[in-house]
């Protein structure tokens, strides 16, 4: 409305030096950062949902709960509970071996989140969510599309068309 002090100040050419920016730190109930596939085991889902509740206000603990979800995922995929998570990721059956790099990157994040207070950011957690969503969809939804295929599809669909060459007349 036009009688708002900020609008009046802007309309009269006055600038205000004070502004406030608010950022949500939590939601009750927590918002899902991504859709967890229906076939995903409850032991994997539970720590992921907890991470959704934590990531805006406490990214380090959110990373730790992602680490717990990875441990549970290894168990769900039939990897024996012996040794470290590093060992378990490297023991994945060949049908899941394409996910080793993504799982290892999330393991690194989870380790740092478990041992430091302010190193992990919300952006780091969001990137981990992108990875784990992709892995879970490939495993439990039967998605056969690889990241490379996604890139190629988006590139083909949205790459600007080349402009026609300009014709110059030479006499």
Image: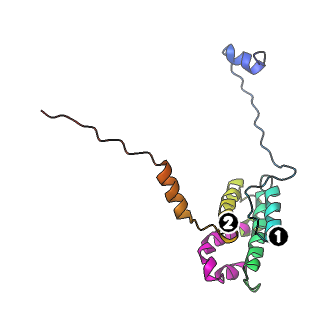
Which label number is shown at residue 143? none
Report which quarter residue 42 is drawn in.
bottom right
Looking at the picture, does residue 138 appear above or below residue 162? below
Which label number is shown at residue 42? 1
Question: Residue 157, how many percent across, how many down?
Answer: 49, 51
Question: Residue 72, how many percent across, how many down?
Answer: 78, 75
Residue stretch rendered in magenta on the structure: 85-110
Question: Residue 145, how many percent across, how many down?
Answer: 57, 65
Q: Is residue 162 left or right of residue 103?
A: left
Name the residue at 59% across, 74% down: 98
Report which quarter residue 1 is drawn in.
top right
Q: CA distance from mark 1 to mark 2?
A: 15 Å
Which label number is shown at residue 137? 2
Residue 91 is inside the magenta segment: yes
Pick whichever, 54 or 160, lies toward us: 160
Count residues near mark 2 (Cα–Cα under 10 Å), then give few for <14, some for 14-19, many for 20+. many
Chief SS of the magenta region: helix
Q: Residue furthest top?
A: 12
Question: Residue 71, how many percent across, how many down?
Answer: 76, 75
Looking at the picture, does residue 77 appear above or below residue 64? below
Q: Is residue 149 left or right of residue 39?
A: left
Name the residue at 78% across, 52% down: 56
Task: Identify the mark nearer the N-term, 1 or 2.
Answer: 1
Report which quarter residue 66 is drawn in.
bottom right
Pick whichever, 22 or 154, lies toward us: 154
Count residues near mark 1 (Cα–Cα under 10 Å), then give few for <14, some for 14-19, many for 20+. few
Name the residue at 46% across, 49% down: 159
Pick whichever, 36 or 69, lies toward us: 36
Q: Is residue 28 left or right of residue 116?
A: right
């Amino acid at each position: 409305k036009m009688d708002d002090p900020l609008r009046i100040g802007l309309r009269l050419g006055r600038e205000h030096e004070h502004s406030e920016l608010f950022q949500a730190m939590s939601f009750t109930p927590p918002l899902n950062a991504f859709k967890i596939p229906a076939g995903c085991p409850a032991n994997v889902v539970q720590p992921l949902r907890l991470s959704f509740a934590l990531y805006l206000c406490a990214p380090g603990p959110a990373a730790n709960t992602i680490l717990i979800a990875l441990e549970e995922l290894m168990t769900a995929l039939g990897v024996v509970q012996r040794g470290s998570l590093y060992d378990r990721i490297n023991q994945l059956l060949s049908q899941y071996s394409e996910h080793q790099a993504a799982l290892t990157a999330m393991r690194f994040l989870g380790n740092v989140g478990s041992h430091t207070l302010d190193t992990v950011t919300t952006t780091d957690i969001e990137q981990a969510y992108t990875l784990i969503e992709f892995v879970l969809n490939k495993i439990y939804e039967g998605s056969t599309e690889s990241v490379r295929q996604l890139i190629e599809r988006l590139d083909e669909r949205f790459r600007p068309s080349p402009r026609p060459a300009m014709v110059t007349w030479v006499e």
